[in-house]
Amino acid sequence: MFRFNLIIYNMKKTFVYFLLSFALVGTFSCETDSFLEDPKPTDEVSDDVVTPDLALVGMYSAYRDFYGGSHDVATSKSFYLGAEVMGRDLQVPDFNWYIFEHRWDVVESAQARRTYYSWEMNYKLIFHANQVLHICDTNPAGLGEDVLNNYRGQALALRANAYYNLIRSFQFTYAKNPSLPGVPIDISLDSNHKSRGTVQQVYDQMYADMNDALSLLSSGAPRLAMHKYRVDLNVAKGLFARIALEKRDWALAASLASEARQGYNLMGNADYTAGFNDFGNAEWMWGFPYINSENFGFASFYSFIDHERGDGYKDIYVNSSFYNLFSATDVRRTLIVPGAPAPGKQWVTRKFRDLPDLSGHMVMMRASEMYLIQAEGLAYSDLSAAKQVLLQLAQQRDPNATLSSAATAAAFVEEVLVERRKELYGELGTDFFDMKRYQKDMTRTGNAVWNAVGFAVGQTVPATSNKWNLLIPQEEIDLNDAIGPEDQNPLD
């Protein structure tokens, strides 16, 4: 595979880039609508096959399998796994993949792999979304508006999701200062260079995209089970709920999360301990499937976190302080087991276990997250109702869980944040991003052994530190005439 120089402003209005990237990932067929067929070679493809559906599945493929040039920046899941080890719960005790994230080295350089990967992957997704919208507007296949609107809705939701991941990676949270410089906003296929929009402008665009997506996805046939990799109305509401939560739009976040989880039941203990490897799980709202020939081998998600896998790096461990958050009767505690008698390696997780043929699926959204968003959003308007929502999830995982006795919304939210860590670890970078959105100082405790940039075990990264933000990639500054060195994020 190759590295994309994804400065989207310089891209031409052509399908060559799209078709080339589509062929390289080699996973989709518009006829079968699956991940199992190889596409035609690029020299056999002509413009007349670029249908909205082909463009759409190519967009999902490019997101699922984006390769940033190294094993710690492979697939969309690397974005979240890097954030996981920047938090307090998962760690890299040896000098191995993701060590630069665990040490926070990645925040010190405008040429760091994580900086380029986070920027390029998300802007590539934005480009593909814009491409889908363009193809829908030109409609070379003569499709009906109902079909086109469904495609448009999926593209808009994924574009908003890309901006969501960009803005929370390259700038502080909305609540800190919505006037701070955000990221360039590009919603067309023109070649004009774009400057950094403000945080407010980025959120305005995300809200506009998501509102349009919900409207467009509200009609049409339900998504087929085999299409769970696609965004439907429930998933779009879940994505919007995440954005609203980040913005502290509490009522909207709670309402969207409640609606998003409708039709999805919390999984029982047997499913929870089955390995998180099958998007057929009834609680999974969104996930990406794989077959054996598509897996990324040593660069796959499971390679780093599944210590029972035959081949893999197996270098991500569980912090002892995190293990101690679980009660003795919590099913999730049974998935954290002894590791090795070495510093930082005493605990590993069995939550994620690859399938025998290395085709384990990637989870992207679950109903449990929606319960947690709903509980947090309700806390500021109806604390009693919020407690009941949290209790439904807590008792599903721990039969001895009891109703929260928190006297204030702030105290209850602290409980929710802990529950988010326990339920979602390894999936979404939850602890790191929650600390950032609540502007909390981070102190790493427990059995973590590596010193980090600006803090070691027992020391603190202040909430005000610029180390929370990635630097704008140097290549963007060099090639984008609308962004100069003066626009770079500051260092401490």
Image (spheres, rainbow, N blue to C red):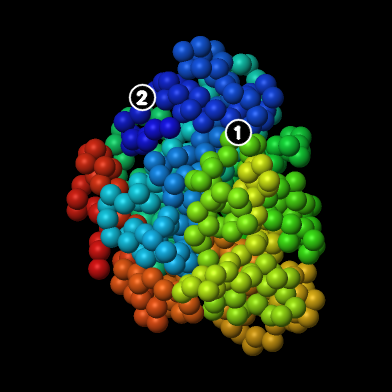
Give the image quarter of residue 393. bottom right
Pick the quarter of the image with the C terminus. bottom left
**Rendered residue at 60%/42% (across/down):** 213
Label 1 element class? helix
Residue toward you, 380 or 10: 10
Label 2 element class? loop
Q: Is residue 88 left or right of residue 154?
A: left
Query: Which residue appears farthest toward the left when viewing the image?
Result: 485
Looking at the picture, which amino acid does disc 1 mark?
Ser
Image location of residue 402, percent across then percent down: 76, 82
Tell me if residue 462 can be seen. Answer: no
**Rendered residue at 25%/61% (across/down):** 490
In the image, residue 382 sits, relative to residue 406, either above or below, namely above
Looking at the picture, which amino acid does disc 2 mark?
Lys
User: Given contact means CB atoms under 8 Å apart, are the residues at marks 2 and 1 in contact?
Assistant: no
Image location of residue 355, percent across then percent down: 68, 47
Pick the quarter of the image with the N terminus. top left
Q: Is residue 62 left or right of residue 377?
A: left
Image location of residue 404, percent across then percent down: 70, 82
Numbered label attached to residue 293: 1
Image location of residue 387, percent across then percent down: 71, 77
Q: Which residue is mark 2?
A: 12
**Rendered residue at 70%/37% (across/down):** 227
